[in-house]
Image: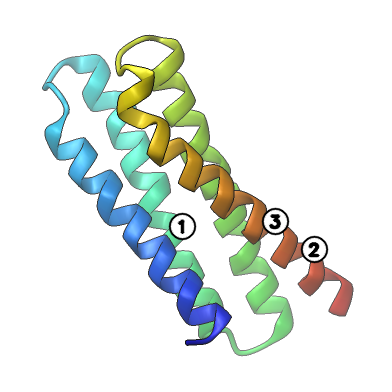
Amino acid sequence: MSFNDDLKNRTKAFAVEIIKLYASLPKTDEMRVIGKQLLRSSTSVAANFRAYARGRSDKERFAKLSITVEEMDESLFWLEIFEESELLHKDRIITYKNEALELLKILSSFRKTLKNRL
């Protein structure tokens, strides 16, 4: 399996796990608002990385990868908001936060490498 395929699978798996988390949240206004933000950003990561992999030029791929990095950082932000607002206990989201941080580091490094090639 190639690096791109691995990241496509990981970003999609992350999105699926966030979808499951969102579906399990209590239906309060706070949970819906923050949950939808997390849902949008995490699914955007997967969709934009998939678009990156199909890019027609290095500039197009760089643009898609940049969006992916932004959306991954936003996903991490919403997970931190859940934790710091004490809407979700740290134990419930630590796995999601760890994966988000790891993916953010990988994607950021990958974007830096691609930028150096432009």
Q: Nearer the viewer, residue 90 or 26?
A: 90
| Number of residues whose C-alpha sits closer than 10 Å to that of mark 3, classed few (under 14), some (14–19) or many (20 or more) | some
Query: For this view, does 51 lie left or right of residue 95?
Result: right
Q: Would residue 95 be visible to someone looking at this image? A: yes
Q: Amino acid at mark 1?
A: Val
Q: For mark 2, what is the residue?
A: 112
x, y percent for residue 98 = 49, 40
Mark number displayed over residue 108: 3
User: If you read the primary sequence from the N terminus, does the residue marked by circle 2 or circle 1 appear first?
Assistant: 1
Q: Would residue 118 be visible to someone looking at this image? A: no
Query: For this view, does 41 lie left or right of residue 20?
Result: right
- Cα separation, mark 3 vs mark 1, equals 13 Å
Rendered view: 37 above or below 49: above
Q: Are marks 3 and 2 in contact (CB under 8 Å)?
A: yes
Q: Nearer the viewer, residue 42 or 97?
A: 97
- Cα separation, mark 3 vs mark 2, equals 6 Å
x, y percent for residue 100 = 50, 45
Rendered view: 67 above or below 31: below
User: If you read the primary sequence from the N terminus, does the residue marked by circle 3 or circle 1 appear first?
Assistant: 1
| Number of residues whose C-alpha sits closer than 10 Å to that of mark 2, classed few (under 14), some (14–19) or many (20 or more) | few
Q: For mark 1, what is the residue?
A: 45
- Cα separation, mark 2 vs mark 1, equals 17 Å
Q: Amino acid at mark 2?
A: Lys
x, y percent for residue 20 = 19, 45
Q: Amino acid at mark 3?
A: Ser
Rendered view: 112 above or below 53: above
Residue found 61% across the figure and 53% down from its top: 69
